[in-house]
């Protein structure tokens, strides 16, 4: 008996009465009516990787349903019945064949919508009329414009537009007061840049262990036979042709364009000749014990990283972390790159002193020429940095000087925020003092 058969049997026997979460993945062709028996308790429903094409007209009876995943199914439009779900705040229909999002399909409490990898050509005006909307994932569609109503989205913080058909960014993007994580690579406006990147043949690599895993792929430790020398590297292998942030080739391009910097996970070359055709990037291997500063956002936190319950940092560590990430941001902007995903979960650190590198260029994109739009886009990365620092300060109170710098980065006018280069100059003397304090 498969896992889904076992779960269905338990559901039909009534064994799951009172359940808050239900996962039924793989094999469904119709919505099991027994799910309605959980109407008073069900909050999270995962129906991904099935062959569903419709949802029941009375889905709104699931009055406590907050999260619905239907990725990898066969829907041609977002089911209008979703709008009847009064508590529904997170919807995931990735790679589901969507060609239309009816206005009535958007529930009033919508906070997080993922429709990556569909065939959408337009969006309804109503999407900008959901005041709680924080996270909108649109990569890998056929969009060439967005509803002007999104210009007034008061809570929108994360927007993924990569791999669509945009000839330019909507001008009102620069005016979104809370936008901190924006991705737009892989559109006509974002021409690929020639790279002299080194090719690293797959048969010159020997995997020696897994280092981590993310939404876009897996990272391994490997030995690279570089001529007569064997050198350890970190090897990222991408899962497919599209990630939640955009295209793997754009991620690799950005990582290689960024070049070598002590606070970046630098790219060494592209992998060629993988037996399954997978795309890969070799990067410098960090010292053993380095790890992500935090975990990625959860269903509840939406756009905020999740830290270990006992996470705490010394003042010196917070200073060094803030400085390291600001230095990375300053280097990227000087190299004409936006990061687009500046987060603690994309910051790798030594776990002790505060040495750190910024990683994951999946949302990175080439900045436009100097001007108001570029200034605003740079300010979005700066806001993301301020949010990261705010999270650190919550676990290390009393750093008034750093808190004052952070506060300047929260200006609702993106173009009025300080540049990373200015932040680095303000932090440098504070870090120097901490390094020479008697406690060291």
Image (spheres, rainbow, N blue to C red):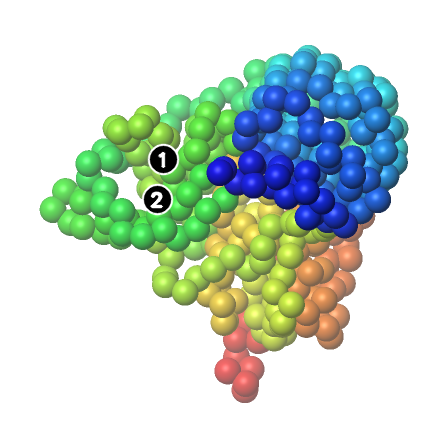
Q: Which mark is residue 193?
A: none
Label tally: 2
> In the image, is 439 to the left or to the right of 373?
left
Under tag 1, what secondary structure?
strand
Say if residue 397 shows up in the picture.
yes
Callout 1 touching callout 2 (CB < 8 Å): yes
Name the image quarter holding residue 390. bottom right
Q: Residue at x 86, y 39 (%)?
A: 63
Name the image quarter holding residue 341. top right
Circle 2 packing at 10 Å, graded few (<14), some (14-19), many (20+), is: many
Under tag 2, what secondary structure?
strand
Q: Residue at x 71, y 44 (%)?
A: 14
Considering every residue shown, the one lying at the far bottom of the view is: 438
Name the image quarter holding residue 149. top right
Relative depth, front residue between 18 and 119? 18
| Image location of residue 242, percent across then percent down | 51, 27
Q: Earlier in the sequence, mark 1 or mark 2?
A: 2
Q: Residue at x 84, y 44 (%)?
A: 40
Relative depth, front residue between 73 and 258? 73
Relative depth, front residue between 25 and 310? 25
436 w.r.t. 238: above or below: below
| Image location of residue 80, percent across then percent down | 81, 20
331 w.r.t. 168: above or below: below
Say if residue 369 shows up in the picture.
no
Relative depth, front residue between 102 and 48? 48
> In the image, is 171 to the left or to the right of 212?
right
| Image location of residue 220, percent across then percent down | 35, 48
Residue annotated with mark 1: 280
Circle 1 packing at 10 Å, graded few (<14), some (14-19), many (20+), is: many
Residue annotated with mark 2: 235
Q: Residue at x 40, y 24 (%)?
A: 194
């Amino acid at each position: 008996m498969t896992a889904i058969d076992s779960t269905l049997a338990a559901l039909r026997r009534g064994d799951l009465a009172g359940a808050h979460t239900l996962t039924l993945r793989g094999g469904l062709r119709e919505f099991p009516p027994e799910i309605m028996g959980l109407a008073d308790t069900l909050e999270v429903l995962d129906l991904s990787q099935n062959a569903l094409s419709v949802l029941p007209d009375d889905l709104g009876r699931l009055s406590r349903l907050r999260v619905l995943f239907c990725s990898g199914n066969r829907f041609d439009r977002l089911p209008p019945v979703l709008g009847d779900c009064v508590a529904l705040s997170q919807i995931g229909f990735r790679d589901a064949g969507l060609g239309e999002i009816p206005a009535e399909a958007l529930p009033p409490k919508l906070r997080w919508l993922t429709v990556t990898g569909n065939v959408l050509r337009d969006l309804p005006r109503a999407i900008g009329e959901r005041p709680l909307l924080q996270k909108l994932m649109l990569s890998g569609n056929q969009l060439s414009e967005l509803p002007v109503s999104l210009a007034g989205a008061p809570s929108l913080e994360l927007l993924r537009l990569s791999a669509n058909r945009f000839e330019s960014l909507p001008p009102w993007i620069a005016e979104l007061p809370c936008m901190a994580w924006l991705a737009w690579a892989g559109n006509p406006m974002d021409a690929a840049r020639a790279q002299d990147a080194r090719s690293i043949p797959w048969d010159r690599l020997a995997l020696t262990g897994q280092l981590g895993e993310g939404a876009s792929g897996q990272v391994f430790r490997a030995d690279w036979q570089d001529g007569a020398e064997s050198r350890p590297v970190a090897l990222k292998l991408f899962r497919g042709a599209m990630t939640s942030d955009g295209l793997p080739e754009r991620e690799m391009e950005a990582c290689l364009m960024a070049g070598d910097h002590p606070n970046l996970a630098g790219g060494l070359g592209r992998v060629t000749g993988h037996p399954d055709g997978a795309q890969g990037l070799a990067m410098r291997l960090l010292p053993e014990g380095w790890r992500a500063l935090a975990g990625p956002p959860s269903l509840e936190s939406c756009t905020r990283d999740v830290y270990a319950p006992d996470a705490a940092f010394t003042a010196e560590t917070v200073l060094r972390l803030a400085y390291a990430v600001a230095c990375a941001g300053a280097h990227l902007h000087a190299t004409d790159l936006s990061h687009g995903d500046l987060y603690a979960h994309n910051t790798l650190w030594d776990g002790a002193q505060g040495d750190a590198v910024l990683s994951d260029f999946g949302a990175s994109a080439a900045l436009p020429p100097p001007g108001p739009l570029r200034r605003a886009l740079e300010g979005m990365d700066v806001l993301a940095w301020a949010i990261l620092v705010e999270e650190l300060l919550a676990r290390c109170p009393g750093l008034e000087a750093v808190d004052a710098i952070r506060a300047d980065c929260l200006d609702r006018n993106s173009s009025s925020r300080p540049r990373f280069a200015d932040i680095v100059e303000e932090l440098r003397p504070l870090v120097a003092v901490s390094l020479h304090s008697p406690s060291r």
